[in-house]
Amino acid sequence: MRSLTVGEPPADVPSPSAAPVARDVFRRAWTELEREIRECTRCPLHANRTNAVIYRGSDAPRLVFVGEAPGATEDREGVPFVGRSGKRLDSAIVEMGLRAEEFGVLNLVKCRPPRNVFVRSAAATCAPYLDRQLALLRPTILVPLGAEALRSLDPEAPRILLAAGRPRRRDGRQVFPLIHPAASLRSRALAERWQADVRALGVWLSRPSDPSAREPL
Ligand code: SF4
């Protein structure tokens, strides 16, 4: 199998706007990408990881939630958003009525930062993996969770409390930011903001004229 180089998507992986990825091409490229991430030593975060945390969800999602970095539970289990924040996110997903085949969940950074302090330089080093994941998954909607995810996916967006709860457009995709679910656990006001923005996302997703709807693979 051909090796994929970080930052250089393989020639057979199209851009989000290109034709659907054939299933066998997808599986081959995804398996190789997972192997590379699990073995990655490109930034210092690899030294502390128990598991690289790569993805959970559909292999043809309409929407991908993009968090920041794994926490302790995610590092232990190797799955994104399975701790307290993950439970809050899962409740929101149920509330919005998203089906399993419609969404995926991942992070900007695949390895847990010490003390859960987000490291921007690690995110920059790790970014080519995210690009390759999105090129294979081909979501038409991205939901950045929190300020760092929004900054990375849409550098021109206003700060998260101004941007959250409304759709934006970036690089041919719809972007609908939310505050980070962990932030919603910190205060009543932020919990109410989270709830209101999740409701707004659910309403927006259910519009009959949703321009992001695309043909299934
Ligand atoms: S955080 Fe990303 S770039 Fe850093 S070691 Fe992990 S997979 Fe590699």
Image (cartoon, rainbow, N blue to C red):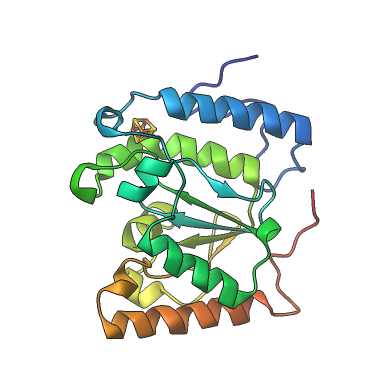
> Foreground: 88 or 36?
88
Give the image location of residue 134, x and y in percent. 57, 45
In the image, taking residue 215 as reference, residue 92 lies left or right, namely left
> Foreground: 110 or 83?
83
In the image, taking residue 44 as reference, residue 109 lies left or right, namely right
Residue sitting at x 29%, y 29%: 43
Residue sitting at x 31%, y 34%: 49
In the image, taking residue 184 as reference, residue 13 lies left or right, namely right
201 lies above or below 32: below
Q: Quadrant of ligand 1?
A: top left
Q: Is residue 6 visible?
A: no
Give the image location of residue 163, x and y in percent. 40, 73
Give the image location of residue 22, x and y in percent. 78, 35
80 lies above or below 131: below
Residue 177 placement: quadrant: bottom left
Q: The N terminus appears in which quarter of the rendering?
A: top right
Q: Is residue 85 visible?
A: yes
- Residue at the far left in the pictured view: 115
Residue 63 placement: quadrant: bottom right
Total numbered labels placed on residues in the image: 0
Residue sitting at x 61%, y 32%: 30
79 lies above or below 96: above
In the image, taking residue 185 as reference, residue 149 lies left or right, namely right
> Foreground: 200 or 86?
86
82 lies above or below 119: below
Give the image location of residue 54, x and y in percent. 48, 40
